[in-house]
């Protein structure tokens, strides 16, 4: 199968190992640095500024793709006019728990959406016609392997995101992990470790501790055994048992037995080594190259195809999703203006233009943003994001009466919302603050149970976390 892809898959596995695939990748020449290593693209292309027609015109002679594979549309900009792609388009979504407000309207851009187990029911509820489960994670052959020159001198190691706003559920577990030092274990907890340094950390660990955020088989679940450490992972994980056998290739823990299990494994060196070795053997089956045939079989299954919702819906979906990507502020603003031109009276498009204006110019654009948000509020009296964004901007003004009025209006709209579609759209502050993450989680829960009013409690004025918008340069 000939695949056109926006991710240089060599960051996971050598291209020659991608069985059954002829690959062509595209992206900005200076864009993709993975674990400190720059991976080149076959075709120089800026999806934030160029269209799908321009991409196909730039393909190497003789390469006619069977499908377009787009990884992480909440992190990587989508080409303009993607809805008119001449081949099936497949999207792979990852951190939807953080970016859900901007990834709910991509139905007309993807024929198939791939996600983890928990995401299938969620995106299906949001109207995506063809959502399929696929484990997108694996270990990276360039960085993860056992090193015979490193001593196993760390009892338990963890490297990952320690931001308590992002990893609210994991944070108390980190404390429990560190408390094992008082019981004689050597513990290493790190953040920001990448590439060979990360591989060396796991290569020195006897046990690699892990806890997922969505019940998914995440990167660390493969990287730990690939580096020869024993993987400890949460027992309630939704996917781990499909890849590793508990007690034989990994050890699963719960709230009631984590510490006893960890200490027992550290005392029983022969058992620990046996499980670590078995886990290492097992994950060799799960390189990207070895998993590629299963992915191809999954994608060969026919489906209903992308929704035909019209160009206006497609432009809006692209503009919303671009807000959380690396796209420069002027490119994001251009995408939002394109959405407004296609639907001048659509509150969702006007709201997106206001947020894109702030993203590019920061607080200097506050007056323009307020004007746009008033217009969006008037265009749809039930649309929640516009009212909340208006309150957020007004909070930085000297008119607290206007701020309180707008916040009360946002809460009223949420409390009386009849559909979750009235909740979806970019919400300030952009980024991964506690406020934005709580909103993304609440939105996810509302979609799952079909109860939009459950989010109203998050929009109380006293919960507002105001941070003056700052211009973005990337």
Image: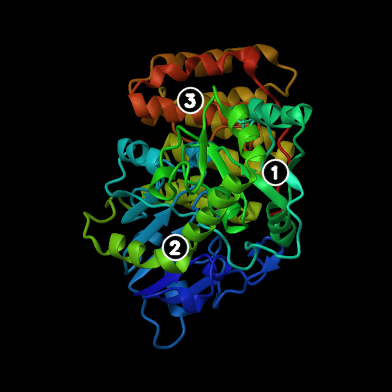
Corner quadrant of residue 155: top right
Q: Residues within 10 Å of mark 1 (few under 14, many from 20)?
A: many
Tag count = 3
**Badge 1 is on which residue?**
157
**Between tags 1 and 3, which lies in front?**
1
In the rendered view, tell whether residue 443 sits above or below residue 80. above
Q: Earlier in the sequence, mark 1 or mark 3?
A: 1
Q: Earlier in the sequence, mark 2 or mark 1?
A: 1
In this view, the residue in front, 219 or 404, is: 219
On screen, residue 105 versus residue 228, left or right, reads left
Residue 168 shows in this picture? no
Q: CA distance from mark 2 to mark 3?
A: 37 Å
**Badge 2 is on which residue?**
285
Tell whether label 3 touches label 2 (CB within 8 Å): no
User: Image point 28% across, 49% down: which residue?
Assistant: 130
Q: CA distance from mark 1 to mark 3?
A: 32 Å
User: Image point 37% across, 47% down: which residue?
Assistant: 313
- Secondary structure of residue under mark 3: helix
Q: Residues within 10 Å of mark 3 (few under 14, many from 20)?
A: many
Corner quadrant of residue 345: top left
**Badge 3 is on which residue?**
442
Find residue 438 and name its label: none
User: Image point 67% across, 69% down: which residue?
Assistant: 38
């Amino acid at each position: 199968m000939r695949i056109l892809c926006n991710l240089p898959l060599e960051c996971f596995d050598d291209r020659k190992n991608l069985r059954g695939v002829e690959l062509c990748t595209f992206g900005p020449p200076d864009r993709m640095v993975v674990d400190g290593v720059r991976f080149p693209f076959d075709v120089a292309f800026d999806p934030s500024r160029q269209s799908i027609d321009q991409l196909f015109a730039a393909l190497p002679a003789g390469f006619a793709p069977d499908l377009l594979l787009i990884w992480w549309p909440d992190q990587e900009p989508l080409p303009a006019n993607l809805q008119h792609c001449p081949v099936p388009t497949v999207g792979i979504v990852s951190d939807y728990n953080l970016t859900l407000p901007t990834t709910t309207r991509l139905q007309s851009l993807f024929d198939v959406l791939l996600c983890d187990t928990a995401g299938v029911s969620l995106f299906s509820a949001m109207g995506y016609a063809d959502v399929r489960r696929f484990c997108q994670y694996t270990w990276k052959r360039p960085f993860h392997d056992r090193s015979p020159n490193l001593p196993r001198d760390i009892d338990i190691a963890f490297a990952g995101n320690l931001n308590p706003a992002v990893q609210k559920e994991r944070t108390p577990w980190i404390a429990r992990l560190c408390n094992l030092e008082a019981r004689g274990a050597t513990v290493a907890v790190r953040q920001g470790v990448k590439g060979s340094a990360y591989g060396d950390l796991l290569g020195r660990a006897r046990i690699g501790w892990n806890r997922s955020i969505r019940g998914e088989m995440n990167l660390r679940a493969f990287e730990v055994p690939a580096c020869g450490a024993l993987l400890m992972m949460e027992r309630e994980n939704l996917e781990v048992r499909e890849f590793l056998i508990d007690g034989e290739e990994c050890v699963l823990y719960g709230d009631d037995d984590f510490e006893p299990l960890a200490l027992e494994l550290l005392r029983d060196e022969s058992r620990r080594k046996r499980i670590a070795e078995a886990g290492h053997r097992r994950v060799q089956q799960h390189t990207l190259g070895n998993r590629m045939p299963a992915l191809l079989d999954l994608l060969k299954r026919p489906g209903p195809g992308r929704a035909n919702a019209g160009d206006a819906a497609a432009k809006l979906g692209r503009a919303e999703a671009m807000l959380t990507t690396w796209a420069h502020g002027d490119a994001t603003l251009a995408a939002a203006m394109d959405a407004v031109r296609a639907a001048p009276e659509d509150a969702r498009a006007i709201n997106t233009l206001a947020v894109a204006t702030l993203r590019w110019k920061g607080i200097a654009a506050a007056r323009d943003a307020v004007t746009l948000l008033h217009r969006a509020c008037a265009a749809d009296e039930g649309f929640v994001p516009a009212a909340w964004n208006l309150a957020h901007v007004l909070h930085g003004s000297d008119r607290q009466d206007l701020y309180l009025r707008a916040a009360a209006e946002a809460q009223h709209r949420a409390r009386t919302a009849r559909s979750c579609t009235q909740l979806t759209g970019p919400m300030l502050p952009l980024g991964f603050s506690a406020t934005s993450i709580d909103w993304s989680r609440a939105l996810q829960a509302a979609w799952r149970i079909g109860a939009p009013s459950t989010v109203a409690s998050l929009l109380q004025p006293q919960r507002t976390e105001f941070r003056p918008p700052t211009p973005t340069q990337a």
